[in-house]
Amino acid sequence: MKIPDQLKAFVIPKVKFASTSLVATVVDYTIYLLLVYSGFNKIYSNITSASIGFLVNFFLQKRFIFTLRRKVHSTFLMSMTFSAAGIGISTFLIYLLNKNPFLDHHQYLTKLLVMGIMFFYNFYTKRIAFEKSLK
């Protein structure tokens, strides 16, 4: 069975993006859980872990995923702006989900849900930052 070119063009970039994002996600997730289960505030833990994950993600994507069509510092600043907004969104989602007693008690699930939601936001905003395109 042959995969149609349009489907391949849609899926392959996301699979490549997901592979580098997996590394950054493991860093983010691990730091978040270490901080939360060490007694740190969940909101500050998310901001810290997501910021470190952003840096790891930026350098991996610059190297392995996207074709740089801007100056590096412009790309970094744009990517950082999108990521700051994403960290704000993810932190707000953490805050909202923690209003649920079950999710408040199970941070590993809360963070996984938020990371899943943020995957698509991150893919498309990074594509804009690196390649000046949504395609």
Image (spheres, rainbow, N blue to C red):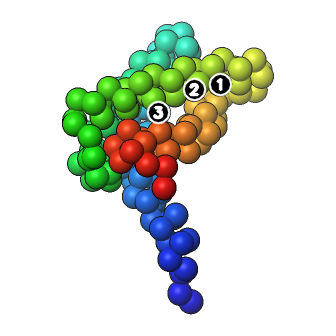
Say left or right for 11 vs 55.
right
Cα separation, mark 2 vs mark 3, equals 13 Å
Mark positioned earlier in the residue sequence (3 or 1): 3
Q: Which residue is mark 3?
A: 29
Lower sequence index among marks 2 and 3: 3
Q: Are marks 2 and 3 in contact (CB under 8 Å)?
A: no
For the N terminus, the image quarter is: bottom right
Q: Is residue 63 above or below residue 39?
A: below
The local secondary structure at tag 2 comes to helix
The quarter of the picture where residue 92 lies is: top right
> Which amino acid lies under the numbered mark 3 shown in the image of this protein?
Tyr
Question: What whole-number distance in Å separates the C-alpha atoms at marks 3 and 1?
Answer: 15 Å
Q: Position of residue 37 (x, y in %)?
A: 51, 19
91 relative to 28, above or below: above
What residue is shown with label 1? 93
Mark 3 or 1: the one toward you: 1
Query: Label for residue 117?
Result: none
Q: Are marks 1 and 2 in contact (CB under 8 Å)?
A: yes
- Secondary structure found at label 3: helix
For the question of whether residue 115 can be seen, the reply is: yes
Kind of element beneath mark 1: helix
Task: Name the amino acid type tagged 1.
Answer: Leu
Q: Is residue 105 above or below residue 116?
A: above
Residues under labels 1 and 2: Cα distance?
Answer: 5 Å
Q: Which mark is residue 90?
A: 2
Seen at 22% across and 35% down, the residue is 72
Q: Residue at x 62, y 39 (%)?
A: 117
**Residue shown at 50% from the left, 72% from the top:** 8
x 55%, y 71%: residue: 7
